[in-house]
Image (tube, rainbow, N blue to C red):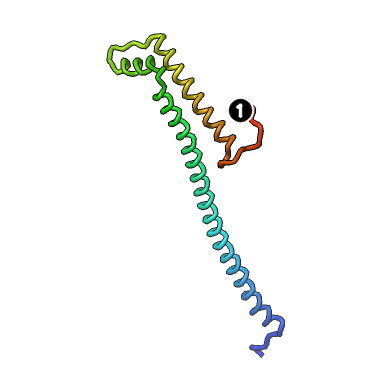
Amino acid sequence: MKGTRSITSTILWRLIPGLIFFVASTGLVSYYLSAEQLKSNAYDNIYDTVSQTKNYLDDRLDVLLAAVVALSNNNSNKDLTQTLHASEEPDYMTGPSDYIALNQAGVFVLNQANEKERMKSFFANGKKNLRKEKNLQ
């Protein structure tokens, strides 16, 4: 009589541990797969963000470089050139005319950069952009 159990208790003693094992293993596998997918998505998003930031900074620096080149090619900047050469001397004192020349050069660079930015936004990818710009004249 020792080995007789009811069919219900035998089924429960064998079924419940099996169910617990399968539920736990399914949970662990799904946790591992979702963690790997989240990691993969995070790396992809970081890569996209970095590449977009790189492209944006490249565009902005290209505009600034073009403005500085235009400034160096402008013949009316003799005061700025003289100021920059004179400032290398150790006993040089900055005067009001130097500030005026630097201000005019800064305004020129900003105007050139803004003009190029407006042209870039107006002609998007070689096609004329049809949106209305307030500062586009």
Q: Residue at position x 62%, y 69% from top?
A: 23
In the image, is 81 to the left or to the right of 50? Answer: left
Give the residue at the far bottom of this rendering.
Answer: 1
Tag 1 secondary structure: loop
Q: Which of these two is toward me, 135 or 48? A: 135
Q: Residue furthest top?
A: 96
Task: Give, as a three-letter code, the residue at label 1.
Answer: Leu
Residue 28 x, y percent position in the rendering:
57, 65
Residue 100 image offset from top left, x and y in percent: 44, 12
Residue 69 occupies which quadrant of the picture? top left
| Residue matched to label 1 | 136
The quarter in which the C terminus is drawn is: top right
The residue depicted at 51 percent of the width and 39 percent of the height is 56
Seen as rendered, the residue at the extreme left is 90
> Dot 1: within a 10 Å radius of its alpha carbon, few (fewer than 14), some, or many (20 or more) residues?
few
In the image, what residue occupies the spot 62% across and 37% down?
A: 129
- Residue, x 60% and y 68% (percent of image)? 26
